[in-house]
Structures are given as C-alpha cells and as structure tokens.
Image (spheres, grey):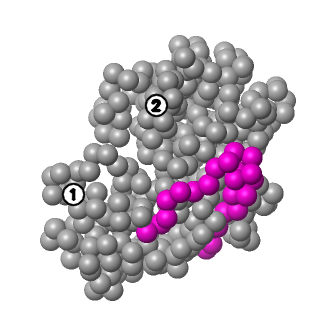
Amino acid sequence: MPKALITGITGQDGSYLAELLLEKGYTVYGLIRRLSSPNHARIAHLTGKVQLIFGDLTDEMSLLRAVEQAQPDEVYNLAAQSFVPESWTQPALTSEVTGLGTMRLLEAVHRVAPNARFYQASTSEMFGNAPAPQNESTVFYPRSPYGVSKVYAHWITVNYRESYGMYACSGILFNHESPRRGLEFVTRKITHGVARIVHGLDQELRLGNLDASRDWGYAPDYVEAMWLMLQQDKPQDFVIATGKSHTVRDWVEASFRAANLDWQQYVKLDERYLRPAEVHLLRGDASKAQTVLGWSSKTHMQEIVQMMVRNDIDELAGSPVKSL
C-alpha cells in the first residue's frame, strides 16, 4: 500500500487529492498547522481515513519529523500563503511560507526519504504578464510577492531534481475552482455573493477589475493531473490548463444568470479590490500534459459556476451539497 504525505491537506486541492489517493488505496498523511481554532471542514468527512501530523513550512525540524513519521512514497506540497492580494500586505510571510517553505520541505525529503517522489504546486501566477498562451517554455514574469515566491519554489524544485537526482517535479496549474474554494478568492466571492443576494442578506456585490482574464478549470480534474505526474518514468514539469480564458465579468454574468438575476443591478466596482500590479491575461497550453500524461480538462467553466452557485445557495439555506 503506497503512502503519501500532503501538505495543505485542509485546502481545496488537498481535500480532493486526499479523496483521490484514498480511492487508489493509499495510506494518506496530512500535514496541518497547530491552530487555536482548527479549520478542518473540507476534510471532516475523511476523519479516521487520513492521518494528520502537526508541522509548519516555516519550521524545518517539524518537517523532518513529519517525513520521518510518514515515510512517504509520494509527497505533495500544496501548502502556501496562496491568496494573491494578501501577499501584498504580508510579503515577508508569503516568501517564508510559499518560497522558503518549499526548500525546507525538499531538504527534509532529501535527508529522510530521498527516494520519495515530490510534487510541487506551481502556479500560472508565475507567468504574470508573459504573452499568452503560456506553456512550459514561457519565461516567467510574476507580478506579485506570491508569484515571485512561487518562482523561487519552482526553481528550487528543479535544483533539487538536478543536483540530487530526486524525483521532483512541478505542476504549473492555472486557476481551478470548486465549491470548496476559499471565500477570499474572487470566484467564490462572486458565487457566495450571489447566494447572499438570493437569500436577501445583501443588496450588492463589490468587486475590482472585471476585465482580468483567467483560464478556469475544475479542481478535482486538476488533482488527477498531480497524481499522474508522479506516476511517470522520469520527473517532468507540466502546465495544467483548459486552454480557454474568460474574464471576471464572464464569471460574474454566468453566476448571476445561474440564479436568474441581472448582474448589472447588483455589482459595484470598488478600487479597494484592485491589485497594485495587475495580471491581465492567463491562458495555458496543456499540450504536453495531453500528450505525455493523457490528461485533459473535463469540466467547462459554465458547469463549475452553476455547481458553485447551487452549493452556496443551498449552504446558506442550511442544506449544503455534500457531494461537491
């Protein structure tokens, strides 16, 4: 029975990945931080099925102990300070967790479990304003402390692979959403805002740049790509994307339409939500993943939007859609 260690297991991707690995017969360990108010809602249904280990990407000794305890065959590093706007208010913390944290985890795996296969969660935010479509050969041009930190994490993963012969690879994932997306992210902010308007809890939804364009996929599709990357004969980096981009305005229109509402009656622009440096267009070219991994995106943006709006409306009504 293979063993996997997932950092960030309480997040959107971590919870879906844990489900996938359990279905495949893995023993799953999850690294969690010790908090006064733990947030395990996304993995509550996995209680007793996954083994949780306390640790922190800012504490190398805790990572060494976690890897020693798990003795994993595969390590998935999904933990990060991943909210882009927050990286502007906490740039040092973002660098410590998202950037140097990856190096600490790689070093722990190198020392304790050098034969484990390592997956690093890279991001399309590393491309920033590089011309679209972006693929594995596109030069990085990050536009936020988060993007810069992820570039460091990406390249330190390459360095450990080339210097120590580790099976270490990165998935450069473009935006991927689900009902488990955090409320701070614009996609969930929109669908949750629609639900609040439907229930009469709010009369408006305030947003920033509606013209930013993103390549949005479905998180469960994308965690399958993570697993496939670690099943190959040799480690390689892959772009994971749908190949189609839509604006925030498109997401807004689709979300309000799913609730039979006219978005223009409720959405207000608010400069507080504008980024200091905007990323205008992200659209990925996942041709390599399609050829090598046999992977392609299965879920259209409209389906994701409808799923998220329905879930948020039901949650506020007191009957969450547990299967999503």
Q: Is residue 57 above or below residue 179?
A: above
- In the rendered image, residue 236, in percent from the top left (x then y), is placed at 76, 41
Name the element at disc 1: helix
Q: Quadrant of residue 2?
A: top right
Q: Is residue 285 magenta?
A: yes
Q: Residue at x 70, y 62 (%)?
A: 285
Other-residue count near label 2 (Cα within 10 Å), few / some / many at <14 / 14–19 / ≥20: few
- Three-letter code, disc 2: Glu
**Mark 2: which secondary structure?**
helix
Q: Which residue is disc 1 drawn over?
A: 314
The magenta-colored residue range is: 280-302
Q: State the mark number for residue 174.
A: none
Can residue 136 be seen in the rendering of this structure? Answer: yes
Magenta stretch: dominant secondary structure: loop
> Which residue shows up at 68% across the image and 48% down it?
294
Residue 292: give x, y in percent of width and height: 74, 46
- For label 1, the crowd category at 10 Å Cα-Cα, with few meaning under 14, some 14 to 19 and many 20 or more, is some
Mark earlier in primary sequence (2, 1): 2
Name the residue tied to disc 2.
23
Whether residue 62 is visible: no
Residue 238 lies left or right of residue 310; in this view the side is right
* Label 2 vs label 1, nearer the camera: 2
